[in-house]
Amino acid sequence: MDRLKLMALDEEDLSVISAYLQDAVFKVGDISWKGQAGVLTLELNRFVWEAGDRKRDRNKDWERRRAVLAVKRATAVKSRGFDRSRTDEVLSLLAIRFQAETEEPAGTLELVLSGEASILLDVECIEVQLTDVSGSWGTEFKPRHPLT
């Protein structure tokens, strides 16, 4: 399958990137904030949802790929629910949401993580890029979201 290279400039585009990144995992140490440039980058292992829900057999595992998420035009970043000094802690990304301010297009971009954790970015506007940076590898684990 081809590598993804997507850009979001509005909420509709952002929802597409959010869907591709559902259940991506990363270490705290894979978060990079360049305050001067206003860019947060996140290296992660995303689950390849676009491969479909094909039936797995002995020779077919599900797939993950290494990808980079870049949020640009950010003015501030905050995190909650995890310790930034624990660089080997693994986090799971559930969704990306945007809350516009009264003076659009500015707002807050939220990376929703499992365990009630999140990364919040104040942004001038939505400018987000997702790029696959490696081929895929097999994984026996498919993320599940049981209804409660």
Image (cartoon, helix red, strand yellow):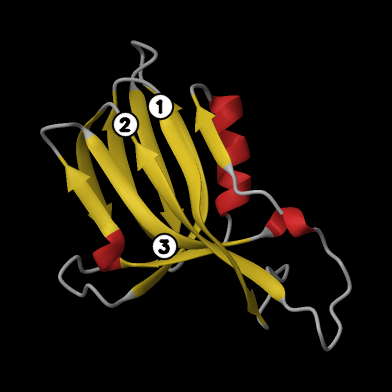
Give, as a three-letter code, the residue at label 3: Glu
Q: Alpha-carbon distance for marks 3 and 2?
A: 24 Å
Q: Dots 3 and 2: beta carbons under 8 Å? A: no
81 lies above or below 137? above
Say which residue appears at 27% left-offset and 43% top-offset: 40
Give, as a three-letter code, the residue at label 1: Glu
Query: For the N terminus, which image quadrant?
Result: bottom right
Residue 140, how many percent across, how many down?
68, 83
In the rendered image, the residue lying farthest to the left is: 36
Which circle's residue, 2 or 1, is located before the other in the chain? Answer: 2
Q: Dots 2 and 1: beta carbons under 8 Å? A: yes
In the rendered image, the residue lying farthest to the bottom is: 58
Give, as a three-letter code, the residue at label 2: Lys
Q: Residues within 10 Å of mark 3 (few under 14, many from 20)?
A: few
Which circle's residue, 1 or 3, is located before the other in the chain? Answer: 3
Residue 146, how many percent across, how many down?
71, 71
Query: Comparing marks 1 and 3, which lies closer to the viewer?
Result: 1
Quarter location, residue 104: top left
Which circle's residue, 3 or 2, is located before the other in the chain? Answer: 2
Quarter location, residue 142: bottom right
Please name the residue that numbered disc 3 is placed on. Answer: 116
Residue 127 - label: 1
